[in-house]
Amino acid sequence: MLKVHWIRALALIIAVAGLLATSVIPGTASTTLSVNSVYCSSLGGGRFECYGYVSGGTYPYTYNWTPTPVVNNGYYMVGNCRVGRPQVVQLAVTDSSGNTDSQIGSFQCTQEAQ
């Protein structure tokens, strides 16, 4: 009799584990690609850096910065700006499924680092 209870308990544990495993398989949940924010700051001397924060979609992403950066490491870029002028930067991201989202960041280009 005790053996039957252990077999039922084991079967229940296996069934629950199977359900949990199928609900967390990567790539099965569809989420919308989103460029959550673009944060930029002046490095001084007419240079700036920006970071883009992306979520959702299907990895890998393609990053397109405007204006064209001097250094482009995907979610991170370094560029040149005119001191004393406001600067606007746009990040457009495309995921491997072809979905696109973009976000704009702005800052004041300064002589000194911010």
Image: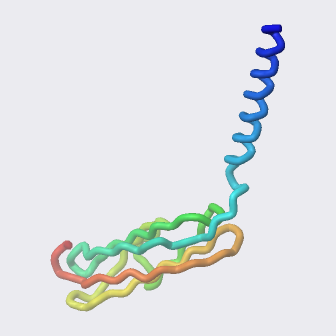
Nearer-the-camera pick, 31 or 3 = 3
Indicate whether 96 appears above or below 104: above
Residue nearest the observer in this picture, 40 or 7: 7
Residue drawn at point x = 25 percent, y = 73 percent: 43
Q: Is residue 24 found left or right of 44 in the rendered image?
A: right
Q: Is residue 65 above or below residue 7?
A: below
In the image shown, does 62 or 104 lie closer to the viewer? 104
Tally of marks: 0
Left or right of 41 on screen, residue 69: right
Q: Position of residue 19 (x, y in %)?
A: 75, 41
Residue in front for this viewpoint, 7 or 1: 1
Q: Please give the name of the residue rendered at 69% of the width and 63% of the height, measured from the top-left corner.
A: 30
The percent coordinates of residue 27 (x first, y second) are 70, 55
**Residue at 61% of width from left, 77% of height from top?**
100
Relative to 25, does residue 18 appear above or below in the rendering? above
User: Is residue 76 rendered to the left or right of residue 110?
Assistant: right
Residue 108 image position (x, y, % from top left):
25, 84
Q: Quadrant of the C terminus?
A: bottom left
In the picture, which quadrant includes the N terminus? Answer: top right
Above or below for 68 versus 13: below
Residue 112 picture location, percent across and down: 16, 76
Answer with left or right where residue 99 lies relative to residue 108. Answer: right
